[in-house]
């Protein structure tokens, strides 16, 4: 009996509503912070390793072409060296292509994450647990609504992969490294 009296106490019910409202706001704030992290992640991932590989590959290709056109250097190159240089240039171009594909896949992954966070934010923003006069039935309804939203948010979270694929970054790095090794083989093969 005392428990029923306690549940009918307006102060208790108001505290429950305040607690639910605090949880709802906390969830909204967590989602906003997550959105900011997703955007930061998008910018950081796209620019870190990828930009270094792209920069070096982009710089090496014209340097190699320029050096190969110099008569003194061209005369010292045999057929094997020419094949290695051609393979290196092709591999560096492939590295550039994989680098751009990697940027696109990372961008797509983070955009999906941002859209996912937006869906969750809309769910938490669609309601408020702040009644004028709280009642036990209203509190029960709010708790059920909170649980329902939480389930839907958890479902969205479970459908979103935790990380994107690194296959294109690996392919970019491998082709970049092979291209660089071929150039090194030619250079060290011609050193006295």
Image (cartoon, rainbow, N blue to C red):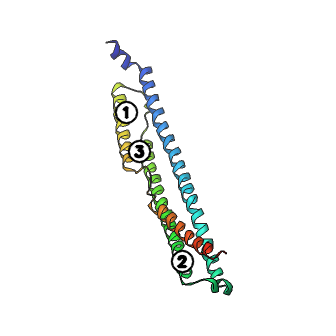
Is the residue marked by circle 2 packed among few (<14), some (14-19), or many (20+) residues within 10 Å? some
Which circle, 1 or 3, is nearer the viewer?
3
Q: Is mark 2 in CB contact (under 8 Å) with mark 3?
A: no
Q: Secondary structure at mark 1?
A: helix
Question: Looking at the image, is mark 1 or mark 3 earlier in the sequence?
Answer: 3
Question: Looking at the image, is mark 2 or mark 3 earlier in the sequence?
Answer: 2
Q: Is residue 126 left or right of residue 4?
A: right
Residue at x 35% of width, y 43% of height? 152
Residue at x 61% of width, y 67% of height? 56
Question: Looking at the image, is mark 2 or mark 1 earlier in the sequence?
Answer: 2
Q: Quadrant of the C terminus?
A: bottom right
Residue situated in front as seen by the camera: 137 or 159 = 159
Q: Measure how far apart labels 2 and 1 are at the Cα level.
A: 70 Å
Which circle, 2 or 1, is nearer the viewer?
2
Residue extending furthest front?
192
Residue marked by disc 2: 84
| Residue 87 x, y percent position in the rendering | 51, 77
| Residue 50 x, y percent position in the rendering | 55, 62
Residue marked by disc 3: 123
| Residue 118 x, y percent position in the rendering | 45, 50
Q: Is residue 91 left or right of residue 2?
A: right
Q: Secondary structure at mark 3?
A: helix
Q: Quadrant of the N terminus?
A: top left
Is the residue marked by circle 3 packed among few (<14), some (14-19), or many (20+) residues within 10 Å? some
Q: Measure how far apart labels 2 and 3 are at the Cα level.
A: 58 Å
Residue marked by disc 1: 142
Q: Measure how far apart labels 1 and 3 are at the Cα level.
A: 14 Å
Q: Is residue 184 left or right of residue 20?
A: right
């Amino acid at each position: 009996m005392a428990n029923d009296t306690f549940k009918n106490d307006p102060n208790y019910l108001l505290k429950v509503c305040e607690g639910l409202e605090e949880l709802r706001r906390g969830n909204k704030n967590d989602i906003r912070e997550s959105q900011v992290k997703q955007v930061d992640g998008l910018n950081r991932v796209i620019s870190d390793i990828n930009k270094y590989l792209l920069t070096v590959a982009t710089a090496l290709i014209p340097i190699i072409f320029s050096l190969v056109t110099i008569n003194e250097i061209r005369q010292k190159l045999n057929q094997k060296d020419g094949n290695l240089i051609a393979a290196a240039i092709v591999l560096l171009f492939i590295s550039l292509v994989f680098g751009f594909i990697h940027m696109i896949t990372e961008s797509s992954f983070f955009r999906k994450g941002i859209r996912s966070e937006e869906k969750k934010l809309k769910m938490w923003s669609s309601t408020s647990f702040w009644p004028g006069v709280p009642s036990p039935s209203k509190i029960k309804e709010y708790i059920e609504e909170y649980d329902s939203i939480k389930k839907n948010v958890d479902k969205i979270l479970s459908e979103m992969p935790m990380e994107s694929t690194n296959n294109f970054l690996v392919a970019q790095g491998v082709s970049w490294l092979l291209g660089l090794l071929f150039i090194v083989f030619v250079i060290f093969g011609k050193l006295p």
